[in-house]
Amino acid sequence: MILARKPIVLVVDDTPDNLSLMSGLLSSRYTVKVAPNGEKALKIAHGDNRPDLVLLDIMMPDMDGYEVCRRLKADPSTVDIPVIFLTAKSQVEDEQHGFSLGAVDYITKPVSPPILMARVRTHLQLKASAEFLKDKADFLEQEVARRTDEVRAVQDVTILTMASLAETRDNDTGNHILRTQWYVKELAEHLRGHPRFAARLTPQYIEVLFKSAPLHDIGKVGIPDRILLKPGRFTPEEMEIMKTHTTLGRDAIVHAEQRLGVDVPFLQCAKEIAYSHQEKWDGSGYPEGLAGDAIPISARLMAVADVYDALICKRVYKAAMPHEQAVQLMREGRGSHFDPDVLDAFLALQDAFRAIAARFADTDDELNEHQARMDRLA
């Protein structure tokens, strides 16, 4: 059985008889340490076994009790140790000064043993309660942080799992998911201070946006292989089927929410991107033909990222377009295909986009593997 440690009481007094008296009164219940002066008291207070309470005389040579108390309360490591003044100074002004320095109590000499023991016990109990509450608060704070990390991890896994599912159907895109994710983040960070976007593009929203971006093509899981993997241009009929990937993607996320029985806030951004990233600024896009600010900001950002990456990347049915040519084509879409301010941000971030494209470049092996897969399906 582990016995609870006795509380440590430090008695500070320059009179040996007073130290002896205090030790005699307290030693049956507490571990008593004594100090004949302020310097020694401070050294003990900062030692390995710090006191739980200090009984402090005021009138001492060199360093009086007021100064000792002031130094204890000025130090973060000793500020929480309760100080009770024991003194012959009984004026109201003396008590007020002691309390103003941070003391918790003030007992005048000669000391009444019952009063002394009651006051010491009370303040040790208060200190123990305060420490318990602090420990509890620290534990709860750590637990909240742990649970928050778990929730974020679940969000990340959910999104990556769904995005990976789409990629297994169409790995022609290679690292397209990663590139567009980072393109969108660059655009959002650049536009944070823009008056049109500042209210929406908070750091918290940009984090959700970054996590949600990989789901922009999740709806492709519902497109037949004969269309999704076709090594050539679509017929008008095939294109209409391909366009349904936006609705299929949105509905897949909605279905997941329905299975949970609640709306999931972090998936709202994913639904917007999946459903609306093919809308165009002038209203000529799909699925709803939205125009201008009616298109969610997340989808407008993804539109720029998605088109740029499609232009610069090699596909089985087309060669990769040089960066400069891709930029010129996108510049021509300013105000028609793209939100003008978002396109301007893209133009300002060209170097960052090229760096991201190089960082997550598709390898020839990945493209050759996909070509072989398509040949087997043909």
Image (cartoon, rainbow, N blue to C red):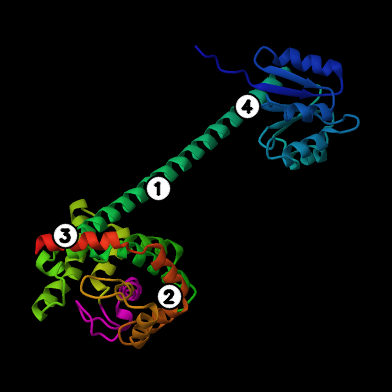
Q: Name the quadrant of the C terminus.
A: bottom left
For label 1, the residue is 148
For label 4, the residue is 124
- The answer to whether any part of residue 18 appears in the image is yes
Q: Residues within 10 Å of mark 4 (few under 14, many from 20)?
A: some
Q: CA distance from mark 3 to mark 1?
A: 41 Å
Q: CA distance from mark 2 to mark 1?
A: 27 Å
For label 2, the residue is 197
Q: What's drawn in magenta, residue-wise?
A: 279-308
Picture layout, residue 272 above or below residue 38: below
Q: CA distance from mark 3 to mark 4?
A: 75 Å
Q: Residues within 10 Å of mark 1 (few under 14, many from 20)?
A: few
Q: Residue furthest right?
A: 61
Q: Earlier in the sequence, mark 2 or mark 1?
A: 1
* Residue 45 place in picture, x, y as percent: 73, 29
In the picture, measured across the screen, residue 132 lies left or right of residue 287, that is right
Q: CA distance from mark 1 to mark 4?
A: 36 Å
Q: Amino acid at mark 2?
A: Phe
Q: Earlier in the sequence, mark 3 or mark 1?
A: 1
